[in-house]
Amino acid sequence: MNGVPMVHADRVSKRFGSNRVLRSISLTVDPGEVLCLVGPSGSGKSTFLRCINHLERVDAGRLSVEGQLVGYRQKGEKLYELKPKEAAFQRREIGMVFQRFNLFPHLTALENIIQAPMRVKGMSKAKATQRALELMERVGLGDKAGHYPAHLSGGQQQRVAIARALAMDPKLMLFDEPTSALDPELVGEVLDVMKELASTGMTMIVVTHEMGFAREVADSLVFMDGGVVVESGNPREVLSNPQHERTQAFLSKVL
Amino acid sequence: MKNGPVHGGTAAARTDALTDDQEGEAIKAIALRHPWRILIAVVLVLMLAVFVLDAAQRPDYGWADVGKYVFDKRISRAALVTLQLTVYAMVIAIVLGLVLAIMRLSPNPVVKSVAWLYIWIFRGTPVYVQLVFWGIVSLIYPVLTVGIPFMTPWMSFHNDIFTNLFATAVIGLALNEAAYMSEIVRAGLLSVDDGQEEASRALAMSWGQTMRIVVVPQAMRIIIPPTGNEVISMLKTTSLVAAIPLSIDLYGVSRGISAVTFTPVPLLIVASLWYLLFTSILMVGQHFIEKRYARGSGQRKADKS
């Protein structure tokens, strides 16, 4: 790819009070790459993901998406915090899928999907609806457009959430433990949608405990613990032959 | 539990096996008697009957006068004034309450404190006392001026708002009610899961869009039932506008008539009947609204905009 990485983190740190959740995280995600972030809970994976679309603010280091600093503007030596509107503009091309789906319960599946394209991009309702129906077909829920989230299974809700994020035509998709809140028999249908998405060349950063998915789909894998990147590389190599003892200890428990 | 033979099969197989004729013998026991329940019911009904029969013939109640005044033009016009006071005061209170609630959730500590101070004062003092104060505020501030403090004002005009007693009543009731409404709205806004706001922000929606499209419609489920209570409460609180003093509302006019005719009790009954009529209608309305909003989340039809 021609130079500019999709995501570039250079010694990114973040603390909540005295708790240092991210310590000098450096990593690069190229366009079209699928990166899996794994590690024990509390290791900072989700926080790092949320920093990428500025739901959390970074305290130190530089984090950029497509060469643009996230949440700040640099003028000479000085950094200026972005206005909420400018921060929102940066998020337009970053889709996010949450562990607990976070669908809007008072809106139908279709209405969930069309809100952002209509309100943020100013798309007409007819066009947004047509696009939403295509996306629902793509995630295998063509017949559920009029259903409220409460009437859908967890796996169906998560697939609607993926369609909702895709409706903004993102260049980058962030997945925050997308299958952790699902019953085991529903995990597969969500992973299938994600695999299909990866095969279309979408850049994806996936926080997950699904090592099978990481092995099969990911281009690279990053193991985090205690706010630092412990080990990273080709997922098959890291998973089958971990170098660091913390990685070994973690993988021996989850594999 | 053994309901006959179970052939190690599925739930369906077992359900098939359970037919009516295999059920145990129906229970035909003598029901337990509840003599105290019956006794208490009889005593209550008798007490009520004695009270009603006695009241019907007691001259002080003046039932003939009740019949005469209940549809009196003056009374029905005053009832309309009471309704207007209720509606105007509630509308202002809901808008102001929403503003105060958002101020209290603001990250700006000064804005937050000002809202807190407002609520502290208006909830912490009796509405009757507040109404008396608004009744005399035009004496404290006879002239309103616009300009830079301590300099010659650009404009000054006579304080007319608070010499209009009806407007004073509406403002007085609304300012008090806003403090209560803001707490109701705040509880509603806080009841919406953080993940909702986060998902909306992640979709690049602005704060205003997030509130309008995502948070407020969900908060309404929590906000509407207690707001119905507040409307019913406000309808009755309007009788306190006598403190201003405004006397064209239902209670004021009833008192005015009885002061001339020396029949206070029949007119109290007349006023009460009208209040009961209105509160009953509101209660029925609230019942349906609560039923509509009590349905499981996600069942509610989306607001079409």
Image (cartoon, coloured by chain):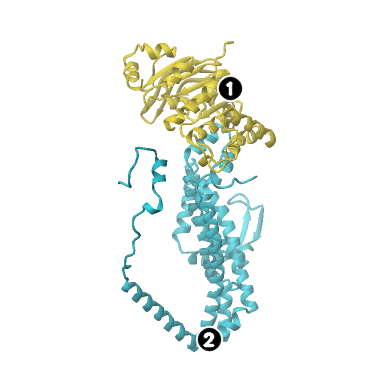
Q: Quadrant of residue B83?
A: bottom right
Q: Badge 2 local density, few (<14 within 10 Å), some, or many (20+)?
A: some
Q: Please tell me the colour of chain B.
A: cyan
Say which element carries label 2. loop
The residue that appears at 50% across and 84% down in the rendered structure is B61
The residue wearing badge 1 is A171
Measured Cα–Cα span from mark 1 to mark 2: 81 Å
Front residue of B179/A88: it is A88
Task: Give residue B290's mark.
Answer: none
Residue that appears at 35% across and 11% down: A243
Q: Amino acid at mark 2?
A: Gly
Looking at the picture, does residue B67 appear above or below residue B219?
below
User: Residue B103 in the image: x percent, y percent?
Assistant: 51, 46
Q: Please, is residue A76 above or below residue A155 in the view?
A: above
Mark 1 is surrounded, within 10 Å at the Cα level, by few (under 14), some (14 to 19) or many (20 or more) other residues, namely some
Instruction: Give coordinates of residue B85: x percent, y percent.
Output: 59, 65
Based on the displayed image, in which of its 4 quarters is residue A84 positioned? top right
In the foreground, B254 or A179: A179
Residue for badge 2: B62
Tell me which chain the residue with mark 1 is part of.
A
